[in-house]
Image (cartoon, rainbow, N blue to C red):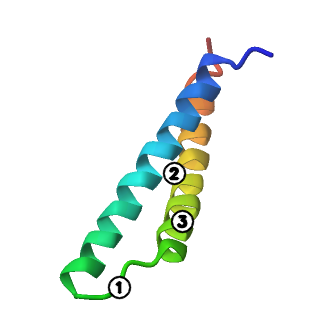
Amino acid sequence: MKVKRSDKNILKTGVISGLFFAIWMSAFDYFDQEPFSIFKFLLGFIFFGGAMAYTFRYHYKSNNKDS
């Protein structure tokens, strides 16, 4: 099964942005001296990463439908 290049870019964007968001939120918790929560980390990673991937997909597909 071959994955299209555009799908790889969308997935990569979602994973990277979700990971950075989750790390950033964990850093805020660390500096506020709150304990690390894996649930909160994964929730931020999945939902923010998914939202960014969906947004990137929408813009990527609308910009490249002419070609």
Q: Residues within 10 Å of mark 2 (few under 14, many from 20)?
A: many
First in sequence: mark 3 vs mark 1: 1
Occupied quadrant, residue 32: bottom left
Considering depth in this image, is 46 or 65 the residue closer to the camera? 46
| Mark carried by residue 53 | none
**In the drawing, does residue 53 fall left or right of residue 41?**
right
Q: CA distance from mark 2 to mark 1?
A: 27 Å
Residue drawn 58% across the image and 37% down it: 11
Which residue is more in the foreground, 56 or 35? 35
> What residue does disc 1 label?
35
Q: Nearer the viewer, mark 3 or mark 1?
A: 1
Snapshot quadrant of residue 30 = bottom left
Residue contact at pointers 3 and 1, CB within 8 angstroms:
no
Q: Are marks 2 and 3 in contact (CB under 8 Å)?
A: no
Q: Amino acid at mark 1?
A: Pro
Q: How many marks?
A: 3
Mark 1, Cα crowd under 10 Å, few <14 / some 14-19 / many 20+, is few
